[in-house]
Image (cartoon, helix red, strand yellow):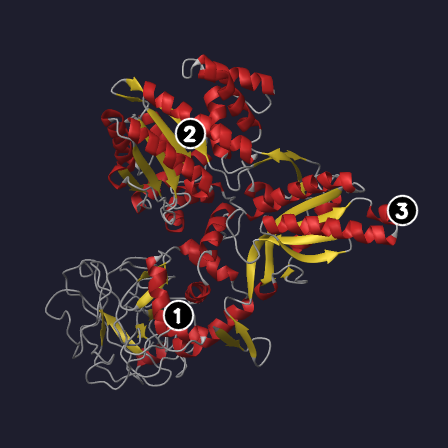
């Protein structure tokens, strides 16, 4: 997909996806502690062997976590996470890679000198050369965050991983961190807040506050499916399906409260959360076992076995109880051990079936689309065994719409409950509640409703955003989700989306092809695919727009300034100077110019041939256009007022075609271009074109206010009307008001000017 640009040089040929992008990445710096003294003590051959082992270990860990080695600087390694593709957890992967590098080097200590390293991770915006983002691609990223990561690495203690504030926000709830003293960095106006990573976090139940908004129907549907499984003793599989942030976890929380009993019989809920990149394929099941037995992480192994044996009392025979407790204890202690995990999962499945034989059981997995295949197989086998035994058991999972769990032989017992975006009214209610709880003005909800796009998590993120944040800034949590969504698109789809986001109005296929220098017919299939993916929407005819304002902002911001300028250059000649009466605003065929199509254009008051603002009307340049006005408002064009009105206020009205403009955008009987009229309103006087000669260069045609009712309504004004200002009674709708004549060239009115006259400006 070649894109030829002339920004910076006469001919620079680039390729799409964008050769360079502004991306938010996490930068990892790792360096050996005391490497100079270590090298001085070793033979050169031993130094070479040590370096090979060190760099090989670091590079292997970085590859496993999706990092790209940007450069090697002596003994230091710099890596990028999220440079060529984001999953929304780039910072988390960078920190996990830093922790694993420490562990891997400690394991190698037995084979040679022990290496201690410092690791710093910083998150921020860089300009990335996408074609060069490969291991050893020196100079592929540029930005201040690279220097910050290097300074954090120098500040980190030996064997420690230190992160910045942006990284801390990105890994909140997933890692355990401890604050350190603020770091003063040369060139930074303020000290940097710094945290040290102390271990992996264990996601607990999310605290949900406030009312449930807009999900009553979905809650009732899922609760009914679970109740049917219990009453009929036929297991059912229920899926809560929605994009990230749509409220899946909140709905699961409400279901646990709503379905605590069925027919006065208590329901046991066994719930686990699937974190990103868990420490073992079956680690969520180990968390479920911990919750079942009331085990905490600091508990010693003997305490864990004792509590498990107590919890299993009455479920398993005494002969099996000890072995089962031992297997589950090993599983809880080391879920990443494949053997211990397999034995523990087998025992846990039998425990769940025994629990279901004694009463209703719901096994719930949150974020099931993150689960590894072994966990899915565990759920399938559990569901099949419960079906064979006719047990009152239900499996409930939450996941995204793009993930499908293929469960064989259960089509009649599966129910997908989609979580559609909240409506505007429901979004407003949620925003007002969140704003009130945060002590912020409720009027802000009107501005945030279109940005939130019906996503509850986005609503919380925008409300939490600081008042000092730049206008139009997208919260980090929302941006990470949008980045991951954009990176799931292929190259052509991303190209079309970014081009459409950079264009100021809705785009047609011809516009996209002109911006990207594509041949005719190439963009339309891609546009339709993006509509099917929910990224674009059809507006009118064959035109498209980005479905969500936030997605448009993120996509547009990713484009470098040079490419944005190139898109503007390609769009400017046609968008600003449409050719011919049938030219489309974006350059495509078959659409009239906005003014010729009857688009309402506001009218500016003039004085002596000057539009509002005092600039003279140039014959080759349209005059300034002021907002439409309402009679009685400050700045209303008042016939006979004889004074300059103050700035006017806009009027909301229904756009209509003027009866004095034909299909070619011209006034019958006149040679000059016609002007679209403002929309009629009960308090707005329609503007009529007078019977005076058309305006010449530098002299706009005058427009006169008249009544919107009566025998003269909708007709051309002829003759000399009565002179004199209209009365307050005359200005009411349904009355015919006298009007003042338009300034005639050479008359006193023309020489003196009239603040009550309005100019009709050719678009």
Q: Is residue 612 above or below residue 609?
A: above
Question: According to the image, label 2 marks what residue?
Answer: 271
Give x and y (percent) for residue 17: 50, 66
Q: Quadrant of residue 463?
A: top left
Whether tag 1 and tag 3 are in contact, CB under 8 A, the answer is no
Label 2 Cα neighbours within 10 Å, binned few <14 / some 14-19 / many ≥20: many
Residues under labels 2 and 3: Cα distance?
55 Å
Foreground label between 2 and 3: 3
In front here: 725 or 680?
A: 680
Residue at point 47% right, 24% down?
Answer: 291
Give x and y (percent) for residue 570: 46, 76
Question: According to the image, label 3 marks what residue?
Answer: 41
Q: Quadrant of the C terminus?
A: bottom left
Q: Which mark is residue 148?
A: none
Q: Which mark is residue 612?
A: 1
Residue at point 24% right, 82% down?
Answer: 692
Q: Does residue 433 show up? A: no
Q: On the rendered structure, is 607 left or right of 95? A: left
Kind of element beneath mark 1? loop
Residue at point 48% right, 14% down?
Answer: 310
Residue at point 79% right, 40% down?
Answer: 114
Label 1 Cα neighbours within 10 Å, binned few <14 / some 14-19 / many ≥20: many
Q: On the rendered structure, is 647 left or right of 160? A: left
């Amino acid at each position: 997909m070649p894109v030829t640009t002339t920004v910076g040089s006469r001919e620079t040929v680039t390729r799409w996806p964008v050769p360079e992008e502004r991306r938010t990445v996490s930068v990892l710096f790792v360096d050996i502690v005391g490497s100079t003294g270590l090298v001085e003590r070793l033979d050169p051959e031993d130094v070479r062997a040590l370096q090979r082992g060190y760099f090989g270990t670091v590079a292997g860990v970085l590859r496993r976590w999706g990092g790209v080695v940007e450069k090697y600087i002596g003994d230091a390694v710099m890596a990028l996470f999220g440079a060529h593709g984001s999953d929304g957890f780039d910072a988390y992967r960078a920190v996990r890679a830093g922790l694993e590098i420490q562990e891997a080097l400690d394991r190698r200590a037995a084979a040679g000198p022990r290496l201690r390293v410092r690791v710093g991770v910083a998150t921020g915006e860089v300009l990335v050369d996408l074609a060069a983002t490969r291991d050893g691609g020196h100079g592929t990223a540029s930005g201040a965050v690279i220097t910050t990561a290097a300074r954090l690495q120098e500040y980190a203690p030996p064997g420690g991983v230190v992160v910045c504030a942006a990284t801390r926000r990105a890994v909140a709830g997933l890692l355990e961190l401890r604050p350190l003293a603020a770091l003063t960095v040369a060139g930074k106006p303020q000290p940097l807040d710094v945290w040290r990573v102390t271990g992996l976090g264990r996601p607990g139940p999310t605290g949900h506050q406030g009312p449930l908004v807009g999900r009553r129907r979905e809650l009732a549907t899922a609760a009914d499916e679970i109740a049917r499984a219990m009453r009929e003793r036929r297991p059912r599989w229920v899926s809560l399906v929605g994009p990230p942030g749509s409220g899946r976890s909140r709905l699961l929380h409400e279901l646990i409260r709503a379905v605590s009993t069925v027919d006065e019989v208590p329901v046991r809920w066994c719930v686990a959360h699937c974190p990103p990149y868990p420490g073992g394929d079956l680690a969520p099941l180990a968390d479920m076992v911990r919750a079942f037995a009331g085990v905490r992480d600091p508990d010693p192994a003997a305490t864990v076995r004792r509590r498990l044996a107590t919890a299993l009392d009455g479920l398993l025979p005494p002969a099996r109880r000890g072995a089962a407790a031992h297997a589950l204890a090993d599983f809880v202690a080391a879920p990443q051990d494949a053997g211990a995990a397999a034995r523990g999962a087998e025992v846990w499945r039998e425990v769940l079936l025994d629990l279901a034989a004694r009463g209703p059981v719901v096994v719930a997995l949150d974020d099931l689309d993150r689960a590894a295949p072994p966990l899915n197989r565990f759920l399938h086998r559990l569901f099949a065994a419960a079906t064979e035994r006719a047990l009152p058991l239900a499996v409930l999972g939450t996941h995204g719409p793009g993930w499908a769990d293929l469960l064989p032989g259960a089509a009649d017992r599966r129910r997908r409950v989609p979580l559609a975006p909240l409506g505007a009214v429901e979004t407003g209610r949620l925003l007002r509640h969140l704003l009130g709880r945060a002590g912020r003005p409720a009027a802000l909800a009107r501005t945030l409703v279109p940005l939130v796009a019906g996503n509850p998590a986005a609503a919380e993120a925008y409300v939490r955003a600081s008042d000092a944040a730049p206008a139009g800034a997208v919260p980090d949590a929302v941006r990470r989700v949008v980045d991951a969504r954009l990176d799931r698109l292929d190259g052509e789809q991303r190209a079309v989306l970014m081009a459409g986001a950079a264009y100021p109005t809705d785009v047609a296929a011809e516009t996209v092809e002109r911006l990207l220098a594509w041949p005719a017919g190439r963009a339309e299939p891609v546009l339709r695919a993006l509509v099917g993916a929910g990224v674009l929407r059809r507006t009118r005819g064959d035109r498209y727009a980005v479905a969500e304002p936030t997605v448009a902002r993120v996509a547009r911001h990713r484009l470098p300034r040079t490419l944005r300028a190139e898109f503007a250059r390609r769009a400017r000649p046609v968008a600003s100077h449409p050719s011919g009466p049938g030219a489309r605003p974006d350059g495509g065929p078959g659409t009239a110019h906005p003014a010729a199509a009857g688009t309402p254009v506001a009218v500016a008051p003039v004085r002596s041939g000057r539009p509002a603002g005092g600039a003279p009307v140039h014959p080759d340049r349209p005059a300034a256009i002021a907002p439409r006005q309402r009679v009685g408002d400050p700045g209303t064009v008042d016939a006979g007022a004889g004074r300059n009105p103050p700035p006017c206020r806009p009027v909301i009205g229904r756009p209509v075609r003027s009866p004095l403009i034909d299909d070619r955008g011209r006034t019958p009987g006149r040679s000059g271009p016609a002007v679209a009229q403002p929309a009629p309103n009960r308090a707005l006087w329609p503007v009529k074109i007078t019977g005076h000669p058309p305006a010449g260069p530098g002299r706009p045609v005058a427009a006169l206010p008249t009544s919107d009712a009566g025998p003269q309504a909708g007709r051309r004004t002829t003759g000399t009307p009565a002179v004199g200002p209209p009365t307050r009674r005359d200005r009411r709708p349904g009355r015919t008001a006298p009007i003042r004549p338009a300034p005639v060239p050479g008359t006193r009115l023309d020489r003196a000017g009239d603040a009550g006259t309005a100019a009709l400006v050719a678009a």
